[in-house]
Image (spheres, rainbow, N blue to C red):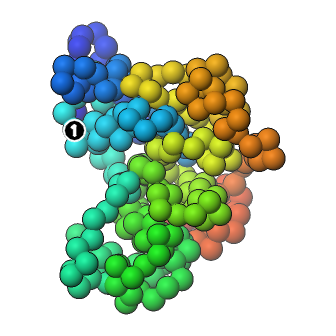
């Protein structure tokens, strides 16, 4: 747990079942805040999306929450024993490095080949597991990175621009996959994107960030907020893209098929 408390009275517990909570997190660069007193909380089964323009501090905030960047103020608390699966925005792969999908997924894990194949099936990776990473398309690589994050069976998925390098149609499919994974596993998801209209159907709560929090709430409300429209413009949400409300009264098995929560609990499925 990373603690840089500005005031001891701001310390609180995670008794409400939260996976992670940030309070007034601040990161400075050159004496100026690039992340200024940000508050957020993620619960199991919730998708929270950070949106904002380039340079808004989204990745810096993620790095601060994950203790990859030093906080200059604020507090980050995590559920004891929290397991995080992280997909970075960029992955630099040495073109001369002889590594295929299977070896990449094996790095740092003792999982069996059957476990790797199951998680690749879950993310919809259909190419050969012996293909070199360098030969994958943008969409295939993103699915492999997501599979690697899921191998740890995380409580919290942290996805920094998970659709980077994917065409428009593929982005929509990947966001739908993320929502399905959330439903199936009941994990929390902290997602970074610069395009809210692409993730509207997949997210529960939105924080619009531009160094500080400009506005937050349900996606359909945020897109009508004057602060959001000032940053992104009034035409950023395509009227033809209807908001989709997913009734969260069921989970999904490893194939993606819906399973009633009661049945899921009765059979004790570990993915619940």
Taking depth in this image into account, of 141 and 236 the one nearest to the observer is 236
Percent of width and height locating residue 30: 18, 24
Residue 154 higher or lower than 105, as above or below: above
Residue 21 higher or lower than 182, as above or below: above
Would residue 198 appear left or right of 163 to someone viewing this image?
Answer: right
Residue at the (39%, 87%) spot, across then down: 131
Taking depth in this image into account, of 131 and 146 the one nearest to the observer is 131
Residue at the (35%, 79%) spot, across then down: 133
Picture quarter with the N terminus: top left
Asked whether residue 161 is in view, the answer is: yes
Q: Which residue is mark 1?
A: 69
Would residue 205 appear left or right of 129 to someone viewing this image?
Answer: right
Would residue 26 appear left or right of 259 to someone viewing this image?
Answer: left
Percent of width and height locating residue 222: 64, 28
The quarter holding residue 145 reads bottom left
Asked whether residue 173 is in view, the answer is: no
């Amino acid at each position: 747990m990373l603690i840089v408390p500005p005031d001891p009275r701001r310390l609180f517990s995670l008794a409400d079942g939260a996976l992670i909570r940030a309070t007034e997190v601040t990161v400075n660069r050159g004496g100026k805040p690039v992340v200024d007193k940000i508050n957020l909380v993620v619960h199991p089964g919730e998708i929270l999306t950070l949106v904002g323009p380039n340079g808004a501090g989204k990745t810096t905030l993620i790095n601060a929450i994950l203790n990859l960047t030093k906080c200059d103020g604020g507090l980050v608390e995590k559920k004891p024993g929290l397991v995080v699966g992280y997909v970075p925005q960029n992955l630099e792969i040495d073109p001369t490095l002889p590594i295929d999908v299977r070896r990449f997924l094996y790095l740092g894990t003792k999982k069996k080949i059957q476990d790797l194949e199951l998680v690749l099936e879950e993310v919809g990776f259909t190419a050969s597991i012996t293909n070199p990473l360098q030969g994958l398309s943008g969409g295939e690589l993103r699915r492999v990175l997501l599979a690697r994050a899921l191998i740890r069976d995380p409580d919290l998925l942290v996805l920094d621009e998970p659709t980077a390098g994917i065409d428009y149609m593929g982005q929509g499919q990947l966001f739908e996959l993320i929502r399905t994974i959330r439903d199936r596993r009941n994990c929390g998801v902290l997602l970074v994107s610069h395009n809210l209209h692409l993730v509207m159907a997949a997210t529960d709560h939105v924080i619009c960030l531009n160094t500080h929090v400009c506005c937050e709430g349900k996606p359909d409300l945020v897109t009508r907020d004057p602060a959001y429209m000032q940053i992104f413009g009034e035409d950023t949400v395509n009227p033809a893209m209807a908001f989709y409300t997913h009734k969260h009264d069921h989970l999904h098995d490893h194939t993606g098929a819906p399973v009633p929560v009661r049945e899921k609990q009765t059979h004790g499925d570990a993915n619940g």
